[in-house]
Image: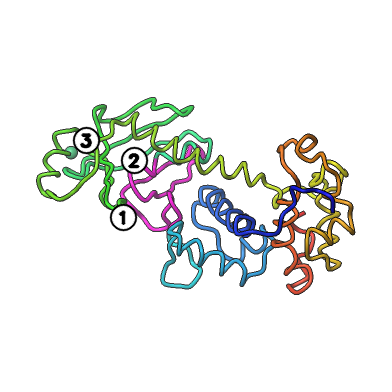
Amino acid sequence: MTDSCCGPASDSETSLVQQMVYFYILEAFPRLGRPPSVDEMQRDLFLPCERIASILDSLAAEGALRFGPVPCMILDAYPYSAVPTRHRVHLREGRQLYCMCAVDSFYVPFLTGLDVRIRSECFQCRSAIEVAVEGGRITSAEPGDSVVWSSASSYDCPMTNFFCCKDHLLQWQETVPDEQGRLLTLPEALEAGRKAAERITQSRQRFNDILWAEAQQLVCYCRQVPKATIVAAIAKGASSAEEIARDTTACTGAWCEDTNPRGRCCCTELQALIEAYSYKLRGGSEDKRGRNH
Ligand SMILES: [Zn+2]
């Protein structure tokens, strides 16, 4: 291998597969209207069950998701909740999701790219609040002067709620004198959701979908090596970027950053593919081989 840009596997490459699982959960939750099961993750991500379990554990340790009473059963994955909350988000197609807090509900239009109707209630008087977000903008809100309290507490979701008006927020604040945070107008809460969702989607773009890519998508642009060839080399036993380079010529050019539309060397993708596929193709159940590429 000649590329100076191809370094050893690092923690960030390890987390690529972790990110794949996390992004899959965030994509599947609104599509299914519930968190994906380990079986579904195994089928769609082509990863062994125990590997998914350990990645879910890591995500839970980082606070990205929480488990229910059964191991590996996802209870919530920010911003979504599998159990009812007071913040319901209706997608245009008729599905309904629960979100962890008022601000989380504003992630949904940006994570899904869909128009949504957020239905919640005033945390003080329990009157209904409904906000429509269409084309990334608030197109209606009832009551029109509803506000959001964005709590600064370390576990902020239970305290981050809608209020039907500023007066009801003030009344509630008198009952929780130690509560810190700030008032957001609905457009400000929408903007907070947009920014948070952008952070997620940007890191998803950086991760660039190679693990979900079709078999014929190029991984190495210098040498025109598609994903299928790389996965086949892993199936035959290649277990490092060097071995894949030897077997497929991938990552042996020196022009990746110019030829790859992602603007970087394919070595990161090789590491991700090794990590995702090496167990399954050699040691895992063989019956699902080929389903995901
Ligand atoms: Zn109220």
For residue 138, what is the image quadrant? top left
Query: In the rendered image, which quarter contains the C terminus?
Result: bottom right
Q: Does the Cβ of the disc 3 residue fall within 8 Å of ligand 1?
A: yes
> Marks 2/1: CA distance?
22 Å
- SS for tag 2? strand
Query: In the rendered image, which quarter contains the N terminus?
Result: bottom right
- SS for tag 1? loop
Reading the image, the residue beneath label 3 is 164
Q: What residue type is labelled 2?
A: Arg
- Give the mark, 1 or 3, whose residue is nearer the N terminus: 1
Q: Does the magenta stretch include residue 97?
A: yes
Where is residue 161? Give x, y as percent: 27, 44
- Give the mark, 2 or 1, whose residue is nearer the N terminus: 2
Q: What residue type is labelled 3?
A: Cys
Q: Quadrant of ligand 1?
A: top left
- Mark 2 or mark 1, whichever is nearer to me: 1
Reading the image, the residue beneath label 1 is 155
Left or right? Give the position of 45 relative to 77: right
Label 1 packing within 10 angstroms: few (<14), some (14-19), many (20+): few
The magenta-colored residue range is 76-105
At 47% from the left edge and 37% from the top edge, which residue is drawn? 109
